[in-house]
């Protein structure tokens, strides 16, 4: 198990003499240093040792340091670990290649030992700050899933929304950052319901006007809960606006048209669909085809964007093949969709 009090460095270089000298240097400075001599085991070593910094030689047996860096930066679990590329190459093209691979810093061999330890110390400190932010974000996500667990009727709702929203966002060509925000938004959109009393949230039958106003406040409560996390800055508009409608009939701010963020519109479409196709305390599922009709009705009223709704309906069979809604989706259509799903993923 990792010693959380020690700053940890993974050294990846094919020269045992070099790694031995570097390990002694870092150990003398109070770091815990682990060593690899090729590229093959880097991903596994990162998972095992959870380093604060990776010192990565560019010229490695097997995959180059550039390629290993790209792999580390590709995956969410490892992309925030600082990577320092070690190289004897000083050409501009090599630095550009490292930047494109996602490297956080460069050191040219031979390097000054004081400079190396100062850079490693600075990057490891940055990694600890990042870990603290990630921990806070994880608490918020756990809170959102706890809210979902309070109500048996909404089991799986957040996961389904994330899946639906990301599929729709990908289909309309959104960026990787927007897809990340949609995934988090699907998980966190209702986190503010932690502030809604169970007597109202789980009430059998229709809410009174006063109770409905209390429920509507979950959008504002949720945004406030996430306001201290810069990592969730792109998700906060989703949380606050996912019940807004283009014609101004939504809440909490009565926004109209382009005032409603595109990401919030996407979550709004898939949230409305999932609500209609699952049993709730106050009514039974409407069924999938009826839900489609209702979404198109909202388009006709100017409440939802026609392109988003129609694209979602087109994608629906492929999405439901892997993440079906609670209401019955015709088995034959699911089977046909499964054959198409790789193309729609």
Image (tube, helix red, strand yellow):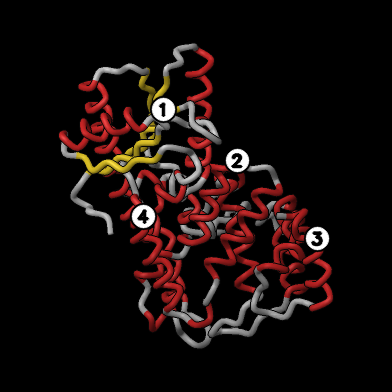
Of marks 1 and 3, which one's residue comes earlier in the chain? 1
Q: CA distance from mark 1 to mark 3?
A: 42 Å
Q: Residue furthest bottom?
A: 204
Of marks 2 and 3, which one's residue comes earlier in the chain? 2
Circle 2 is placed at which residue position?
175
Label 3 close to label 4 by CB (< 8 Å): no
Give me the residue at 18% from left, 50% from top: 5
Give me the residue at 66% from left, 81% from top: 285
What's the mark number on residue 85?
A: 1
Q: Nearer the viewer, residue 168 or 46?
A: 46
Quadrant in the picture for residue 283: bottom right
Q: CA distance from mark 4 to mark 1?
A: 29 Å
Circle 3 is placed at which residue position?
340
**With 258 as the anchor, is 147 left or right in this view?**
left
Of marks 1 and 2, which one's residue comes earlier in the chain? 1
Circle 4 is placed at which residue position?
137
């Amino acid at each position: 198990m990792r010693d959380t009090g020690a700053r940890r460095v993974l050294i990846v270089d094919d020269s045992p003499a070099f790694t031995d000298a570097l390990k002694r240097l870092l150990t003398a400075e109070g770091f815990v240093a682990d060593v690899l001599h090729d590229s093959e085991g880097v991903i596994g070593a990162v998972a095992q040792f959870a380093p604060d910094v990776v010192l990565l030689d560019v010229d490695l047996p097997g995959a180059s340091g550039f390629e290993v860096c790209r792999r580390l930066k590709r995956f969410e679990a490892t992309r925030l670990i600082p990577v320092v590329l070690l190289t004897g190459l000083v050409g501009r093209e090599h630095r550009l290649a490292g930047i494109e691979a996602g490297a956080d810093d460069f050191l040219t061999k031979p390097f000054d030992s004081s400079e190396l330890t100062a850079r490693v110390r600075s990057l490891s400190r940055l990694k600890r700050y990042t870990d603290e932010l990630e921990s806070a974000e994880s608490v918020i996500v756990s809170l959102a899933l706890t809210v979902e667990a309070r109500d048996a009727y909404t089991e799986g709702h957040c996961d389904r929304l994330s899946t639906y929203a990301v599929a729709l966002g990908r289909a309309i060509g959104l960026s990787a950052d927007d897809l990340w925000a949609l995934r988090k938004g699907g998980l966190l959109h209702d986190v503010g319901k932690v502030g809604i009393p169970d007597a109202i949230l789980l009430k059998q039958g229709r809410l009174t006007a006063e109770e409905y106003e209390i429920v509507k406040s979950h959008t504002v409560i949720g945004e406030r809960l996430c306001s201290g996390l810069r990592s969730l800055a792109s998700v906060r508009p989703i949380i606050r606006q996912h019940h807004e409608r283009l014609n101004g009939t939504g809440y909490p701010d009565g926004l109209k048209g382009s005032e409603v963020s595109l990401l919030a519109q996407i979550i709004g479409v898939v949230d409305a669909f999932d609500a209609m196709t699952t049993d709730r305390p106050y009514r039974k599922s409407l069924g999938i085809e009826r839900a489609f009709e209702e979404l198109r009705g909202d388009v006709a009223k100017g409440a939802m964007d026609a392109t988003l709704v129609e694209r979602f309906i087109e994608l629906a069979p492929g999405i439901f093949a892997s993440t079906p809604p609670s209401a019955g989706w015709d088995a034959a259509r699911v089977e046909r969709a499964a054959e198409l799903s790789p193309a729609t993923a």
